[in-house]
Image (spheres, rainbow, N blue to C red):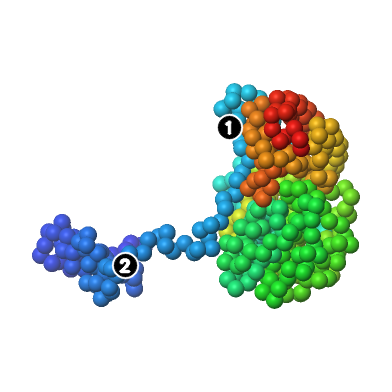
Amino acid sequence: MAGGALSLKVKSTGLSGQNRNAKNAKDRPLQRGANATVRKWPLSGSGDWRQNIWGSRLEGMTRTIEDLIPDYLRGLPVYVPGKPIEEVERELKIHAVKLASNENPLGPSPKGIAAAKAVLADSNRYPDGGTHALREALAERHGVSPDEIFIGLGSSELIDLAARVLLRAGLQGLTSEGTYAPFSVAIRASGAELVLAQQREFAFDLRGMAKAITPTTGVIYLANPNNPTGSAFGREEFYECLAAVPDGVLVVLDEAYIHYALSMGLRDSVEAYRKRKNLLILRTFSKVYGLAGLRIGYAIGRPELLSAMNKLRTPFNTSGVAQAAALAALDDKEHVTRCIDTNAAERERLSDGLAKLGFQPVPSEANFVFIVVGPEAKALSDDLLQMGVIVRPLGWMGFPEAIRISVGTAEENDKCLSAMTQVISRRAGKSELAAR
């Protein structure tokens, strides 16, 4: 070889180039590199290559791809998202308000928007796969180390990863009836047995859940405040429950709505985490920070557990845009305070308005209101939809006679109460809704 040129010597076979290539393709394996061999399969179409080449006997196999799906996955429910506002407006040709998905009606943090725009031009680059800047900021805020912070796709990915790491066939996952559906899905998708404790007055019965723990319990899922009922448990009740949980059982505490729970101390769960090794706390940027569309959240947990979860997450699970927006939104105290104060005032006004219409809203610590309306809950929701108000019927979450209404802006809540008044007036004396 001279001057960097590569010299190849081809031995003549007496065949033309075209015929020689045909003979090579027919009679010889195709060479790839020094050691690799790629075989050209004969196109018999009969499946005989299995038997002819390796002596295998697969021609009688009748299994389908669907047969490979485990039984415990076949019956899993599909998550039902709220109806998109664009779809409603297109179908009905009216202006609609969406009060179905517990979104922040005031929008994202302005600082988060600016940060997202600033890095958007770099979207041709992969994001920081280790989410170092965001983890360090969150670690400093909560008084833990960056190794105790895990960044994921909202709370949803974190819920799933905890089950995938710790549960399997032969173990049990425990949660409550009437809570966030992905808890149950994560348990069942792991192959473990799902155990549901009963609720008490639309709230977690923590004592009942503690009594339901068995030697095969691996993970317990709690939501505080609870979705979809909006109820919350306090510090003493939570600490009493933790004391009854063995060290070998993980407690996953989903605090997606914790910022709206004004009656609760936000540091309580982190203080409990410092004392207990079996607590995993979940937070999200989807609610008070208004970044639901960017899908980013985080967990606070022991490094050993987070390391195992990290092995199962997809590479680059959160975008650079989401990371930048979340990091900036953390420091936007003015926006967070405005969102919390607005939600508190409008939640009270919405609850009072529903009470004047004859309903009994469950006291809420979140950014939504839960009400039981009777057997016609779905029909009532459909009537509201026709009037441009999208609310959430809860049959799929175990409450076929209830609906959940997200707290919107003052104008959105006014439209909801006005539409509800008209629907009830039309239905008065015609159904059980009048006797709620």
Using residue 228 as the reference point, say whether residue 378 is left or right of it. Answer: left
Relative to 327, say whether 22 is above or below.
below
Point 72% across, 28% down: residue? 429
The residue tagged with tag 2: helix, strand or loop? loop
Q: Tell me the quarter of the image containing the N terminus.
A: bottom left
Relative to 331, say whether 107 is above or below.
above
Compare residues 401 and 115 and report the one nearer the observer: 401
Numbered circles on residues, count: 2
Q: Nearer the viewer, mark 2 or mark 1?
A: 2
Using residue 404 as the reference point, say whether residue 91 is left or right of it. Answer: left
Write down the residue under mark 1.
Answer: 87
Q: Position of residue 358 (x, y in %)?
A: 81, 34
Q: Position of residue 403 (x, y in %)?
A: 71, 41
Residue 31 visible in the picture: no
Residue 61 is marked as: 2
Relative to 207, say whether 360 is above or below.
above
Q: Tell me the quarter of the image containing the C terminus.
A: top right
Farthest-out residue, top = 93
Q: Earlier in the sequence, mark 2 or mark 1?
A: 2
Q: Position of residue 344 (x, y in %)?
A: 85, 40
> Would you identify the image quadrant in which residue 136 lies?
bottom right
For the residues labelled 2 and 1, the Cα–Cα distance comes to 46 Å
Point 79% across, 56% down: residue? 200
Q: Residues within 10 Å of mark 2 (few under 14, many from 20)?
A: few
Q: Amino acid at mark 1?
A: Glu
Compare residues 350 and 197 and report the one nearer the observer: 197
Q: Amino acid at mark 2?
A: Met
